[in-house]
Image (cartoon, helix red, strand yellow):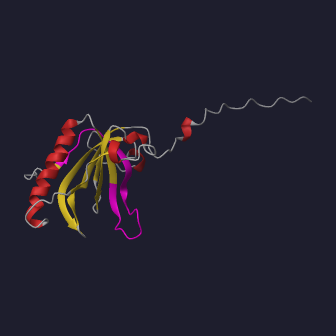
């Protein structure tokens, strides 16, 4: 079904971080578990950034009457943030030169590979790999917080990347084991 509002978008190549795509996750005990991730958008990807900003604007406009009492608040919160200004670059140096967004949904996202085949193996989508994301902007007004966020809908893997969780592969640590020579008897 086509999105006539312009709030549903597909990113260009972005990097996946804090990926919880196969099972819902709650960072705090009082939160509802959700499927979630952070995406890192290179500042050079002006096409994706323009799509995000346009979708945010359209969602804010749509929420003007339903969420914001007839006008868009001047201090509206947006999901798109500049990592060079708001990110913890000392702890997460991969964020430098990027914008970042946190995305979530109570419903499991569609997960596919380059050829549009379903991804069922958790090891294929991890924090550090490169993906495209289909997401939808929406306005919210919750407990006095007003803003525009994006729901996580679908993820398509683009390419592998260095894992961001510090994990390594066993094959990176070991050399192949050669068969031992039979012991020679001295008797």
Asked if residue 27 lies in the magenta stretch, the reply is yes
**Quarter of the figure with residue 106:** bottom left
Q: Name the residue: 19% across, 53% down.
A: 136
Q: Residue 54's x, y, as percent? A: 14, 47
Q: Is residue 64 visible to us here? A: yes
> Is 5 on the left-hand or right-hand side of 35?
left
Q: Name the residue: 38% across, 71% down.
A: 30
Q: Is residue 5 shown above or below 92?
A: below
Q: Residue furthest right?
A: 187
Instruction: Choose between 167 and 99: the one closer to the eye.
Output: 99
Instruction: Choose between 20 and 81: the one closer to the eye.
Output: 81
**Quarter of the figure with residue 14:** top left
The magenta span reads 9-36
> Is 149 on the left-hand or right-hand side of 173?
left
Q: Residue 93's x, y, as percent? A: 42, 40
Q: Is residue 7 visible to us here? A: no
Instruction: Choose between 50 and 166: the one closer to the eye.
Output: 50
> Is 136 on the left-hand or right-hand side of 179?
left
Q: Residue 55's x, y, as percent? A: 15, 50
Q: Residue furthest front?
A: 74
Instruction: Choose between 41 and 1: the one closer to the eye.
Output: 41
The dominant secondary structure in magenta is strand
């Amino acid at each position: 079904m086509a999105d006539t509002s312009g709030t549903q978008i597909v990113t260009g190549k972005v990097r996946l971080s804090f990926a919880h795509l196969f099972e819902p996750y709650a960072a705090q005990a009082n939160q509802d578990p959700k499927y979630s991730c952070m995406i890192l958008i290179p500042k050079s990807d002006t096409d994706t950034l323009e799509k995000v900003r346009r979708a945010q604007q359209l969602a804010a406009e749509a929420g003007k009457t339903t969420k914001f009492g007839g006008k868009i608040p001047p201090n509206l919160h947006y999901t798109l943030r500049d990592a060079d200004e708001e990110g913890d670059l000392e702890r997460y140096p991969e964020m430098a030169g990027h914008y970042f967004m946190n995305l979530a949904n109570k419903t499991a996202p569609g997960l596919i590979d380059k050829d549009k085949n379903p991804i069922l193996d958790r090891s294929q989508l991890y924090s550090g790999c490169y993906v495209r994301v289909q997401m939808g902007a929406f306005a919210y007004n919750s407990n006095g917080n007003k803003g525009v966020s994006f729901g996580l809908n679908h993820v398509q893997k683009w390419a592998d990347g260095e894992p961001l969780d510090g994990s390594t592969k066993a094959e990176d640590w070991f050399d192949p084991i050669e068969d031992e020579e039979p012991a020679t008897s001295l008797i």
